[in-house]
Image (cartoon, helix red, strand yellow):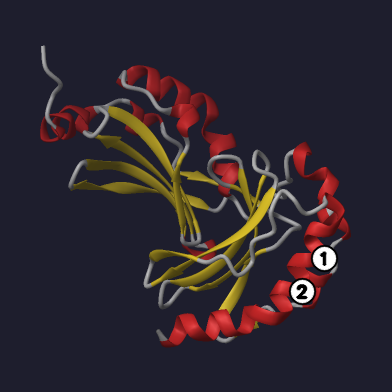
Amino acid sequence: MGQASITEIAAEIENWDLLQKLPKQIGDFILCPGSGIKGQILNIAAYINEKTHCRLDLTYTSETFDYVPVKTVGLHTFRDERYFARDREHFAKMLLQHLDDIIKSIDRKEVHKFDYEAEALHFEQWDYWRSLPQLLEGYELFITPENPLAYINGSFIFLDYTDFENGNQVYFSYNIFRNEIFAEMKKDNLPLTTDAYDVGCNVADDKKLELLTTLLQNNLQKTLEKLKKD
């Protein structure tokens, strides 16, 4: 027996009891109706905090036939693979059990920490970032080392300058598996790469943030200006 089409799935969940069991609000996140089908994605419902640019979308994808929670923090959108499920009722059970924790993981009011693998870099002793302006060239300092974002594939985003109006961004991550610091960018919400801030595993852990400081001093303002102009 083949898989149901995404339109059939959409019809089947119209009376899904999960939708009645979901709390109307969790902290500052408001439950909103799903936006329907777009391509291979069925948006079932969403918890949205517009003020902090954060949301959790409950989705079904016909690409892999899974129910998937999708997190958005600022311009960062990523799937939480811990709660993928092909079985609808199993997904509902997991979601109701862990929903508060999933929301907390994207709530910028909550204080988040690096994993223990980052301890050798001593982010808590890195004071340079505190000298960075809250607004720079029209970009907002959105994420700082005091409250990093656990992202994908072992990366923690610890610094993020975002122009929300235009979808431009530069952000800095530490990957606990590769023991590297690097930056990535977005222009009009499309991803771009740069090696201007690479701090590789060959750099001693206690020197990594020192080197990043130099790279930021030399390049950050120029990077932000270039993103605006290009």
Residue tagged by mark 1? 210
The quarter of the image holding the N terminus is top left
Q: Does 43 sit left or right of 153 as displayed?
A: left
Q: Is residue 201 left or right of residue 26?
A: right
Would you identify the image quadrant in which residue 143 lies? Answer: bottom right
- The C terminus - image quarter: bottom left
Q: Along the line of sight, which residue is nearer the eye, 175 or 47?
A: 175
In the image: residue 159, left or right of residue 223: right
Q: Residue at x 54, y 40 (%)?
A: 153
- Counting from the top left corner in percent of width and height, residue 77 is at 44, 52
Tell me if label 2 and label 1 are in contact, CB under 8 Å. yes
Say the numbered circle drawn on residue 214: 2
Q: Is residue 109 visible?
A: no
* Quadrant housing residue 3: top left
Give x and y (percent) for residue 164. 46, 73
Instruction: Tell me if residue 78 comes above or below residue 65 in the rendering.
Output: below
Q: Residue at x 69, y 54 (%)?
A: 200
Q: CA distance from mark 2 to mark 1?
A: 7 Å
Q: Amino acid at mark 2?
A: Thr
